[in-house]
Structures are given as C-alpha cells and as structure tokens.
Amino acid sequence: METETTISTFLSDSILERITDPAIRTVGEKLINDERLTPKDGLACFNTQDIIGLGQVASAVKRSRYGDKAFFISNHHLNYTNVCENKCRFCAFHRAPDSKDAHTYTPEEAAQNIAQSPVVDLREIHIVGGCHPDLDLDYYMDLLKALIRAKSSLKLKAFTAVEIDHMASKAGISSLDCLKRLKDAGLSAMPGGGAEVFSERVREALFPNKINADRWLEIHGEAHSLSIGTNATLLFGHLETVEERVTHLFRLREQQDLSEGFKAFIALPFHPENTPLAHLPGPTGVDILKTIATARLILDNFAHIKAYWVMLGLKLTQTALHFGADDLEGTIVKERIAHQAGAATSPGLTRKRLVEMIEEAGLAPEQRDTFHRPIQES
Amino acid sequence: MTASILKETIKKASQGLRLDPNQALLLYEKADLLTLGRLAQTARFRHNPHPIATYAVDRNINYTNICVSGCAFCAFYKEKEDPEAYVMDRDTLNAKCDETLDLGGTQILYQGGLNPDLDLAWHEQQVAFMKSKGLHVHGYSPPEIVFMARTEGLSIHEVIQRLKEAGLGSIPGGGAEILVDRVRQKISPNKASTSQWLGVMQTAHDLGLKTTATMMFGHVETLKERILHLLAIRELQERTGGFTAFIPWPYQPGKNTLSGRAAGGTTYLRTLAISRIFLDNMPHVQASWVTQGHHIGQIALHFGADDMGSTMIEENVVASAGVKNRMNRDEIIRLIETAGFKAVQRDTLYKPLENYKPVEKA
C-alpha cells in the first residue's frame, strides 16, 4: 500500500523559501498546485544556477509518488547484432556487415547466451541491435520465440522504433502489422532508444539516415495502441541546444497525453569516445542532474524516470536518485553500446551491488518486473 | 520527537549558528541529501559570498616512495630494496619545476614517504632550490615532520623553523586520516598520533605558516568519529586561525591491505556538506575531483565546496591505488563555469591571481 502523500509534503514552505532562483520557486508552486509546466518553465530549469533547489522540487515529485523507494530489475542486455546501416555520428557501436568485428547471433546462439546468464532471478531481456541489411522479419520473430523457449518466464523488451521501422519496411508491411506479429512472437515491451533529440537540425547533422521524430512517436503510439508499454529516451550533451531538449520533452509529454503507453523516461548523456564527435567533452555532472530533474518535472504523465547507471556511473546514479529519478535499470550483465563509446562503468552489476548502492544513498531498493510491478520476495 | 529536534537543528544550521557534535551527527545521519546541500551552500556563501570558485595550478612532487610507515590504506609506498623504490634527484626535481612554471603553475605540493636515509639538511636544500625557482613550496605533511624531528632528535618547532627558513611556504594537511586514535591504531599505527598531528599544525600556525586540513574517511571509522575529527580541526582553528582550507576525501581501496569498497557519491557529498556546515571557522572547502571524477567533483561546488583544488600536473598517490582522474586547466575552468561560477586561479594561500584566458581550440 502506498501512503497518500502530496508534493507539498516534501516541498515545505521552509524549503521553498530557501530556493534562491525565483523561477524554480515558481515551478515548485505550480507543481504543488497541480499545474503543468510550460516550455518557459522547462528552460528556466535548464538555465538555473540553483541545482539544489531544482533537485528539491524534482525530489519532492518523486517522493510524493514513491517515497524512499528506488527500483531496479534483474535483467540482461542482449545485442543480437552490431551491424547497422544508419551510421549515426554519435555511435561507436555499429559495424559494417563485412567488418571483422561484426557479429550477428542466430536465434539459437542468443537463446544459449541467455540460458547461461549469471543472473539467477532473471526477469527481462533488453534486446537492441542495429538496422541490419539482410535480416528478415522471420529472424526477429524466431529470435523472440527462441528466447521464450529458453526461459518461458522471461519478459522481452525488444527493438527500438528505429529497428521496427527498418524491419517493417524491409518486409513491406506497416509498422503496426509488424508490431502485432512481434507481439504474437513474444514481445512484451519496447525500449526507448533511437529517439536521440527531436530536432531536424540535429538529425541532419548527426543521424540523417534514422527515422525522424514524427515517425518515432508514431511507432510508439502504435505500440501503445496494442498495449505494448514502451520507454522513451533523450540523447543529450552533443550538438543540441537546451531549447531542443525542452521541445523533445514536451513532444514526449504530448504523445503520452494521447497514447498513455510510456512507462519510463531515460536521459542518456552522450559518450563521445570512439565516435566522430570524440572532440566533444560530453555533458557535465551538473548538466546530467539538471536534465534528469527537469525531465521529472516536465514529464508529469510519465510514471518513472531512470538514472541509467551504465552511462552515469555509480556515484552520479546515487545522486540522481535524489534529483527526481526513481529507477536505475538493472543488472544488465554485459552492456556494449555505451561501453564502446567509453563508459567507465563495469558492464554489469550484481543484484547485491545494486542493493548496496541504493541503500548507501539512503533509499529503499525495490525489485520490479518489466511492467514496473513490484516482485514479491520468495 | 527526533523529527522536531532535526527540524530545530536544520533551522539552527541555516542561521549559521555553531553546532555541537551531537547536532552535527544528527544532521549527518538524518537530514536528506539536498537539505544538507542547501545548508552547506548557505554556509559556503556566508564564507565566500561571491559566485566564484577557485583553483590552483600546481604539481605534486613525491620526493621518495620509500616509507617505513606501512599504512594499511596506502598503495604508494615501497620498501627500500624494491626495484621501484626511488629518491628524486636534483635534475629530476629541476625538470619538474621547470615544467610546472611553463604550465603557469605557482606551487609545488611536495610530499614523500618516511625515508630514514633523508636528513633535514637534504630537505632544506631541496626546499631552498624550489623556492629559488620562484615556486611556492606547500610541503611536508605532519607525519613527515614528526618523523624528521624524531630522526634528527629535534623538536617539532625546530624542524618547522628550519624548513621555513629554507623557504617552506605552507604545510599540506595530509596524514590526518581520522584524528581519533582508535582509528589510527587500526589503519596507521606507525604514523603521527592525533595529538602529534594537531601539534605540528599548531606549531606551524604559531610560526606563521598556513596549512590545510584533510580527512580521509570511509574505512574503519564511525560517523561519530568523523564528526570528532571535524571537531578537533574546528577547535584548533579557533585557537590559531591558521587553516586555509579543509579537504575531505574517501579512502580509495586498490593495491593495499585495507581492502573494502570506496564510499559512494552520496556519502561523499553528505560528508563534504556536513564539513562545510560544521567547520564554521574554516575559510575554504575543497572538492576532490581526484577521487570523485569530473561529475561529482563539479557537483561538489553545490554541496559546500568553493574550490576545485588544483590541476595536479602530476598525481601519484591516488593513482597508485588505481584511481586515475586527469584534468587540465581548461577543463577545470569549464567545469566551474558550467556549474554556474566564475573560475578564478588562486595561489596556495587562496589569493586570486590574474585571470587566465583559456586556449582557443581550433
């Protein structure tokens, strides 16, 4: 049972009056009064110097919903291929089909990989690959089926909207039909990757071959219409402006108002190593906290805001859980995409380590499933 | 009951009133992270009212890694017979000084192991040499001074006096670890005791040398012992006013015998914040990007730190435990400015220097 609490429980007058930035105080007052933020409020969050104040407001929203809980999942990341024809400029993961370190798992290899997972209480597989020129829809369906055969209790969170668009157009069917067939094959949920930044300007500069914002949102809307829950991301800290970040968050909020199927938002700090943008420094710690806190405040219709430990590092993840985030993803086992771009974290964490780090941050760890429901301890 | 006491204590701290150790412990244990952050930031602006964060350009020079102390947390020291053992010769010292000056550096942080083969006369010559190059020598933590006094049969006062006359400009606050003898017995039984550490600092202050103070936390000590450490520093500062800055950092496990796990990001920020709140007579508090990395190192500026430490052209001790964070001057400036502060280079005694213009990148 959740106890009834409101934002004002955690954002008392004495906290509010010590917020030094009047714009952040206004944001806090609006949220207490159940008013939605405007894009101008969003910009004020990004531009504030009072990150403690911004964090206090974001944390009050988080605590009003979840108290001291911080959620995680026992999961395993699986990258079925690193072959991708999109060649996005921020990516260090993709390989050409004839590259000597190109890999593509057969469905059987993927299933074997998961059967050997060190995660004893494995709940979910997070499946992301690339836009492979030669794989057909049968491959993707066989992949899902093989994984379910390996362990029937697993939930499959698979394929970004970018991959869905790619496989549907190769198969000559609509993305909605494609999603239906994947759902029949075992798809439970979709990850939020491939959104990058909803800006045509940035898309032309960095990921011209990838689907645009309208198409990404359309596919997520279709998934929601089929009761496939999805996540959403923002890749930030490269060429985009703060205005473009705010636009991105508002477009997500609008889509969620329409289709209500987003479960979690994940802010992904750009990692420049081994990419054509290696000369950029990547976002700072303060910027990452601001982005997570602002997302919590603008995305009032999203249940969960993740602090993705792989990209944040453990110290910053702990801190982010006090700046509005309520979830830190999971055990993962072998993360490849961020690590190819220089992420300094280990590729996976044990459940014990996740629990310890949440507890050290003064919070209560709670294991969840793919649908963000608590797991009953056996 | 506790809730109302906590509320009162938060109020007291926000008004800048002096906390007793029990009140500090209550805040440290019970206040949430951002409440501590807010209180620390209020205290920071009370001491340093301008939205400026300072940094220094310096070089760590470790004159020897031979050390007889054998502290359980240390991955730097070597036995004399070890093939990697060294004592730095004059040519190497000279080259390192020149390089520091070329990079706009103003000070040398000069520290080393407790090496019985090095006598005070040798140290005096090295200090005088660095000083003659135009560098401020911030050198010899209290355990080194205690060790010199013992091997030379001199008083602490005489050792510091002689080093000062040779050109020593100030003393770094290392070797404090936790100033509680129960803890020191466990982690560094051969090193200066609490009263010896404080005695060196008091003597230095009496002789007109400024010093810093540090705390290495997150090993065998309790939260209460951390507060007792802060109390010892605050009391001495009350008497002498000789501390310029306080620098807390978490113990870094690595290639040492103490093992364990490094304290996390929230523990660091909470400890930094309670230090700023409790040390109401300390002019500056420094962020430890060397142990925390760029992200938390920058965020520390919002949790009570008003100084980013130094660029550390060379850092060997933390690096030897496997933690390698690097930063050049442009990067420090970028982090300070994107955190919302104006970056100002300072000297060892926290005096602002003429502003440096970052190099334009092509």
Image (spheres, coloured by chain):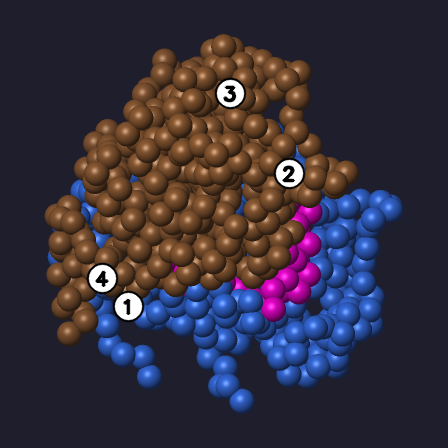
Chain colours: A blue, B brown
- Three-letter amino acid code at the position of disc 1: Ser
Q: Which residue is mark 1?
A: A64
Residue B298 percent coordinates (x, y): 42, 39
Q: Quadrant of the C terminus of chain B?
A: top right
Tag 1 subunit: A
Q: Are marks 1 and 4 in contact (CB under 8 Å)?
A: no
- Outermost bottom residue: A378
- Three-letter amino acid code at the position of disc 2: Ile
The earlier-in-sequence mark between 3 and 2 is 2
Q: Which residue is mark 2?
A: B66
The answer as to whether the residues below labels 1 and 4 share one chain is no
Q: Nearer the viewer, residue A271 or A135?
A: A271
- Three-letter amino acid code at the position of disc 4: Asn
Numbered range of the magenta stretch: A321-350
Q: Nearer the viewer, residue B21 or A215?
A: B21
Q: Which residue is mark 3?
A: B124
Give the alpha-carbon distance from disc 3 to disc 2, as whole Å. Answer: 19 Å
The earlier-in-sequence mark between 4 and 3 is 4
Q: Secondary structure at mark 3?
A: helix
The answer as to whether the residues below labels 1 and 2 share one chain is no
Image quarter of residue B182? bottom left
Q: Nearer the viewer, mark 1 or mark 4?
A: 4
